[in-house]
Amino acid sequence: MRRCLPTTDSGPATDAVPDRRQFLAAGAGLIAAPMLMVNAEARGVVRGGGSTAARSARFQPSEGTQTVTLNNGVEMPILGLGTFQMTGEECERSVLEAIQTGYRLIDSASAYDNEEAVGNAVRRSGVPRNELFVTTKLWVSDAGYDRARTAFERSLELLGLEYLDLYLIHQPYNDVYGAWRAMEELYREGRIKAIGVSNFHPDRVMDLIIHNEVRPAVNQIEAHVFHQRTAALEFLQEEDVQMEAWSPFAQGRKNFFQNEVLRSIGEKHGKTVAQVALRWHTQRGVVAIPKSSQKAHIVENFNVLDFELSPEDLAEIAKLETGTSVFFDHRDPQAVRRIAGMRPNR
Ligand SMILES: NC(=O)c1ccc[n+]([C@@H]2O[C@H](COP(=O)([O-])OP(=O)(O)OC[C@H]3O[C@@H](n4cnc5c(N)ncnc54)[C@H](OP(=O)(O)O)[C@@H]3O)[C@@H](O)[C@H]2O)c1
């Protein structure tokens, strides 16, 4: 069954709920594990906690890859490819084109139903595993200690990888503390190189920091010129948590690509609206993961680190702030209810 994708990646649509509930009710998570192992073995994935080499591997930036350093010393590319709303062949082709263009960071999620496609592209690229930085995310229904461990194995097997560079709790809902304990263990085992969160407001980040041992390395949140998240950025910088911007183009909403301020700044630098926006993110020290399924856009979005926005440019962009999300607020009870009702299509 194919699921309808919503316009923000708050997860899959509700049509898959009964399948998932029946699956869990039947304890099929355990039954499914050997089936997934067969697939993994067919793809040559090492089982049983990964090889010693994988456990000690870490991302090695190839020449020219600009990175930020996370609070545990791991380097992460400052620019990557988002993959929301891309599945199957389209996703595999786009990720492959991105890697061939020079992207080294790929952002996936269990809820995107594209981990297998991302993994295929990673293998087809021929780029050494330790020169790529692969992120995926734990969905709300998998929050909790046992479920998170199972979900991690499932994601890794779909990706066909021995380790993850970054694993994020996708939403600040359900048993995130149980999930975090499982992720801390996997991190200590060397099977995830960095762990983090997504869509956490500063109070939730602080609570997680105070009550756990491993500090989140990353918080991936909505950020773009219309919703700049300046207070969140300052808080995250103080707490040594890397901010990563999702929907760095506001998904094109509010006529993003026709924005006159960005267009005129771009004209001065010989750059497009998209390139100015990505330079703004990266110049703030924020990791950005623009999504594109078009080769020309993939290339355009990568050529953004060779110019500098001036203080005047930044002051003009600051005025575009609207003070609100172009999607929804994760603290809105109705949003919590809606997202809680969504289940990955497994
Ligand atoms: N953690 C979360 O809750 C969360 C939520 C949302 C997104 N994300 C992540 O963040 C990534 C990016 O966000 P997003 O996909 O929502 O939106 P986005 O990157 O802000 O915008 C994507 C849209 O911009 C278009 N586009 C890309 N480059 C362009 C260019 N140079 N010129 C004109 N149009 C261009 C794309 O169309 P084409 O494909 O035709 O180029 C697509 O319609 C996601 O893919 C996902 O990995 C995470």
Image: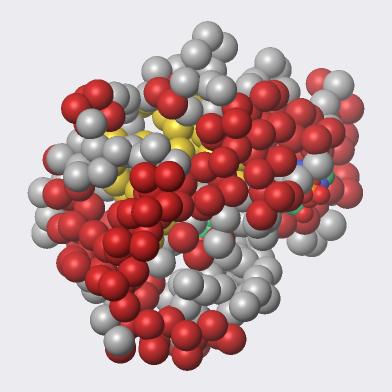
Residue 303 location, quadrant: top right
Residue 39: percent from left, percent from top = 42, 52
Residue 171 location, quadrant: bottom left
Work out whether residue 205 can be spotted. yes
Report the quarter where the N terminus lies.
bottom right
Q: Residue furthest top?
A: 63
Q: Is residue 345 above or below residue 203?
A: below
Residue nearer the viewer, 311 or 197: 197
Residue 269: percent from left, percent from top = 81, 21
Residue nearer the viewer, 42 or 321: 42
Q: What residue is shown at x 15% (from left), y 58% (from top)?
A: 181
Q: Is 27 displayed left or right of 200 in the figure?
A: left
Q: Is residue 182 above or below residue 165?
A: below
Q: What residue is shown at x 39% (from left), y 87% (from top)?
A: 21
Work out whether residue 332 can be spotted. no
Q: Is 298 displayed left or right of 87 in the figure?
A: right
Q: What residue is shown at x 34% (from left), y 69% (from top)?
A: 32
Residue 192: percent from left, percent from top = 28, 41
Residue 295 location, quadrant: top right
Residue 34: percent from left, percent from top = 30, 61
Q: Is 183 displayed left or right of 308 in the figure?
A: left
